[in-house]
Amino acid sequence: MDLTVKTAKARTLRPTFSFYVPADRNLIGACAEAADAVAVRGPSGPNVVEAMRREGFDGIVLFDCANYERRAKPVAPQSWFEAQARAGADRLLTTGRWVEWDPMGDALSAAVDAARAEAAEVPGVTLVLAVDSRWLTNTDGIYRTIDILKDVPEPIALVLAHRDDPLGAMTAVNNLLALTTNVPNLSFLRSDHGAIGAVAIGAVHGSVGLIPRYRHFVPPSAVGGGRVNDRTARVFIFDLMDWFTGFTIAGWGASGVNINCRFDCCGGRSLARFFDDRLNADAHNLTVLAQLGNHVLGAEPEDRRAEFSKLCNMALAHYGPMGKLSDVTEPKSQITQWAQFTYPQLR
């Protein structure tokens, strides 16, 4: 099989966004229609999409083998490349490597070398690296990361790892800007809506997890964060530019945030309905995040950063007491960081 990759033709090597989903036919089809592309997790993804192709599916697809996960079963690189090619991948990705934090930088250098060796016979393959977020947020770490990645000739796709929010550290977004400015053809997989912000500041592609466990990667040695004993759906609220559980939303009462969804997915219904833990918010989240991605990336290239930042600034005005003084919602660090990029001329 000819695995030669013509990266110049890859749609996802231009400013684009996708949804990151498991190998579920219904989710793949819906997300491919709503976004520029869909990223499918796991080694079974190519087989599922190949079967869909035979039935007429023509969506743009990327495949993340996720071989960096703790219990992943090793997949032979050549077989993985061939499976992606048969399924019509927009570009081929390596199987994925975990990069633990190493202040000296040796672990990242070794992972890049190993990924390049894996793809040596297939020019143009994208190198997938799941990296401890300290490679981005640590002061020494970001300099070493840029120094190691900036001259790598292949495209790179990063999965940022943290037990809660990889972009939560106060230095994260500024360092992300430095990274996207200095490293060409950079993608971010398995992220929250910050992936759209990353494209707005220079990345070529960002993939947002539709399901909570795919909105960041928890390091193999860590335990994930999240709200204990709250099984209600996590809902993206456009006006707050962040995610909240149905339980939290239902408790807000009268506030400055309109919790009646204005998008077609909900028909004006209240987001407080997700207090019912039998409901999932996939349709809502897909619709609203697609609106966000299309709005930001539909702007002129020089305006995208400011447009994403402006939405975060508008969101900040809605935080504070949520119906009563004792119930105060504070914006996450990520939102306040993105808000700093608004240009003065924006109104």
Image: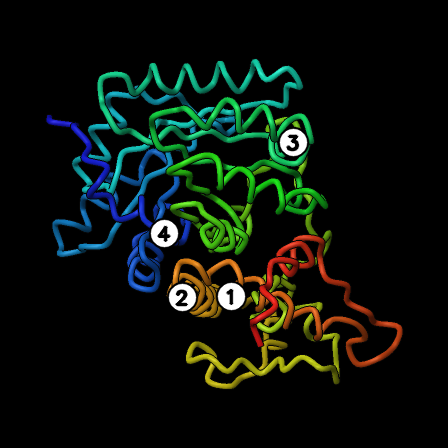
Left or right: 329 in relation to 284: right
Q: Amino acid at mark 1?
A: Glu
State the image coordinates of residue 46 (x, y, percent, origin top left).
Answer: 26, 39
List the residue tagged with mark 1. Answer: 307
> In terms of image quadrants, where is residue 166?
top right
Which circle's residue, 1 or 2, is located before the other in the chain? Answer: 2
State the image coordinates of residue 254 (x, y, percent, origin top left).
Answer: 75, 85
List the residue tagged with mark 3. Answer: 134
Nearer to me, 227 or 125: 125
Quarter of the image with the N terminus is top left
State the image coordinates of residue 132 (x, y, percent, origin top left).
Answer: 60, 30
> In terms of image quadrants, where is residue 294?
bottom left
Q: Amino acid at mark 3?
A: Arg
Residue pictured at 61% horizontal, 62% vertical: 243
Q: CA distance from mark 3 to mark 4?
A: 25 Å
Q: Which is closer to the viewer, label 3 or label 1?
A: 1
Q: Are marks 1 and 2 in contact (CB under 8 Å)?
A: yes
Q: CA distance from mark 2 to mark 3?
A: 31 Å
Left or right: 252 in relation to 47: right
Q: Amino acid at mark 2?
A: Ala
Tell me if residue 302 comes above or below residue 188 in the rendering.
below
